[in-house]
């Protein structure tokens, strides 16, 4: 064979071996791919998401679930969807308990007396009026508290000092957050008067991280608060100098009966299958300390901007509908998402929710794409990943979970994707007073929208099924 013949043979075999779609798979048209590319490139030139985020975090600011600020945020959502020209905008009711932070103070008394910087955990009960004073009993981890003899714990204030580790994926959160979620009931069952945990956060600032505590039905409810990282270090050092360190803790909160809040939905109605939905999820509520820029104003802005680009820049509505859902009360326990999943299961249209994804991991760039879809749709995911390649995004070799809110819909059978963000710095800010707009990089936000618009457009325009 001459060199020329060799090339010809190679070209021929490449042609034969080129991946052609199996006959039973629904192809993705070249035109759809071209439009997705155009949308991706336009997204990189648009600051729509940043403008939405600035508007939400400035005009409304912090928006604790069930507070008057969440009501304002919901009105903001309706107004912005309408202004952007979404085809349908509506609210779905959610009952949300109303927790309010009133007072939080802690100080070391006796040996090494000095104030400590703390914040009450979300949903925490108060201490008795005037506060409690008790000796500290220290555990390195939640599991150590679990294994402890109740006699050690009785009438003390439990202190758990485990430090959250920093990972790009946020993998340090799960192991550390047990102390926040389950620590109070575990301590109370052993007779503790209150619990202080090291903040679940990776920063070294003197800013405590709030976040929900979960009380078990069978345990007494005790006050629960988080120390800033430096204050937790301080307490650990004091315990090195003396076995007897006492703290006075005064936390006052209220918990009122549930009030009616709303998931806010903006829809771009499909031209062929209006009753099939691609779901873009995020949550509109935030904790009360910062202005909720990274958690989860960023997700709200990214998903709204991605869907908006599609309705703005394409000639016609996509094949199926796009629903941008701004969930209520995620921080109090995924209340809005659970309500959405239950309501739509009852309504009988859960099966029309074709695929979904959630943006709730800050404003860092997307770096990987994971999927959890039927085999027949994998070739579409491959194309999404290829189109996201120039944005620095790789295919993740794990199954997508869908995120906390959209995960509730996955549990009812909806396929999901994860647009995985770089969360290296996310837990420096998460649930603190430092979660503010200045921490958001507009370029990273544009990159997010570019990735989201590729996912959203292909998911809405490909006529096959992800289920
Ligand atoms: Zn969040």
Image: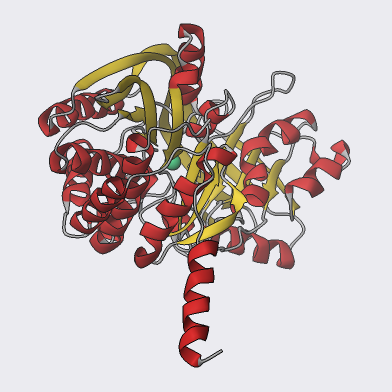
Residue, far bottom: 2
Residue name at image x 57 percent, y 37 percent:
374
337 lies left or right of 274? right
Q: Nearer the viewer, residue 349 or 291?
A: 349
Quarter of the image for residue 112 reads bottom right
148 lies left or right of 191? right
The quadrant of the rendering that contains the N terminus is: bottom right
Residue name at image x 39 percent, y 51 percent:
362
Q: Nearer the viewer, residue 252 or 430?
A: 430
Quarter of the image for residue 232 reads bottom right
Q: Quadrant of ligand 1?
A: top left
In the rendered image, the vertical position of residue 434 relative to residue 352, given as above or below: below
Query: Is residue 210 visible to the viewer in this orientation of the structure?
Result: no
Residue 330, given in percent of the width and then of the height, sits at 45, 31
Residue name at image x 27 percent, y 22 percent:
71
Q: Nearer the viewer, residue 324 or 23?
A: 23
Residue 251, given in percent of the width and then of the height, sits at 50, 34
Residue name at image x 61 percent, y 30 percent:
214
Residue, far top: 347
In the rendered image, the vertical position of residue 161 relative to residue 68, given as above or below: below
424 lies left or right of 450? right
Residue 441, given in percent of the width and then of the height, sits at 28, 62
Residue 26, given in percent of the width and then of the height, sits at 45, 37
In this rendering, the count of numbered labels is 0
């Amino acid at each position: 064979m001459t060199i020329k013949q060799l090339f010809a043979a190679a070209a021929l075999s490449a042609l034969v071996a080129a991946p052609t779609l199996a006959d039973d798979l629904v192809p993705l048209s070249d035109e759809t791919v071209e439009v997705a590319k155009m949308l991706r490139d336009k997204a990189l030139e648009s600051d729509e998401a940043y403008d939405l985020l600035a508007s939400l975090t400035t005009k409304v600011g912090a928006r604790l679930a069930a507070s008057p600020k969440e009501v304002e945020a919901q009105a903001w959502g309706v107004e912005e969807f309408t202004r952007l020209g979404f085809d349908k905008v509506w609210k779905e009711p959610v009952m949300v308990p109303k927790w309010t932070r009133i007072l939080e103070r802690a100080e070391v008394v006796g040996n090494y007396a000095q104030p400590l910087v703390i914040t009450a955990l979300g949903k925490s009960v108060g201490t008795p009026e005037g506060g409690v004073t008790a000796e500290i009993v220290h555990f390195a981890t939640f599991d150590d508290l679990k294994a402890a003899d109740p006699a050690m714990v009785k009438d003390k204030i439990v202190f758990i000092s485990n430090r959250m580790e920093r990972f790009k994926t946020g993998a340090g959160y799960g192991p550390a957050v047990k102390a926040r979620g389950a620590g109070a009931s575990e301590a109370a069952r052993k007779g503790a008067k209150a619990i202080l945990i090291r903040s679940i956060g990776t920063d070294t600032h003197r800013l405590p991280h709030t976040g929900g505590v979960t009380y078990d039905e069978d345990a007494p409810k005790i006050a629960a608060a988080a120390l800033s990282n430096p204050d937790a270090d301080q307490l650990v050092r004091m315990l090195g100098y003396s076995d007897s360190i006492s703290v006075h803790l005064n936390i006052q909160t209220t918990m009122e009966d549930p009030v009616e809040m709303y998931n806010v939905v903006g829809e771009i109605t499909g031209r062929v299958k209006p009753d099939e939905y691609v779901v873009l999820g995020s949550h509109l509520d935030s904790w009360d300390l910062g202005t909720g820029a990274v958690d989860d104003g960023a997700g709200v802005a990214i998903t709204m901007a991605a869907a908006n680009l599609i309705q703005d820049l394409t000639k016609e509505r996509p094949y199926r509908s796009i629903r941008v859902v701004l969930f209520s009360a995620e921080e109090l326990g995924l209340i809005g998402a659970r309500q959405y999943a239950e309501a739509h299961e009852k309504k009988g249209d859960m099966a029309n929710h074709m695929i979904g994804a959630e943006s709730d991991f800050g404003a860092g760039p997307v770096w990987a794409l994971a999927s959890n879809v039927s085999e027949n749709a994998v070739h579409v995911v491959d194309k999404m990943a290829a189109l996201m390649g120039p944005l620095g995004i790789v295919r993740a070799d794990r199954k997508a979970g869908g995120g906390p809110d959209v995960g509730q819909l996955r549990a009812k059978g909806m396929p999901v994707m994860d647009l995985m963000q770089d969360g290296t710095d996310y837990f420096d800010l998460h649930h603190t007073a430092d979660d503010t707009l200045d921490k958001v990089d507009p370029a990273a936000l544009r990159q997010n929208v570019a990735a989201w618009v590729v996912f959203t457009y292909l998911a809405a325009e490909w006529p096959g099924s992800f289920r």
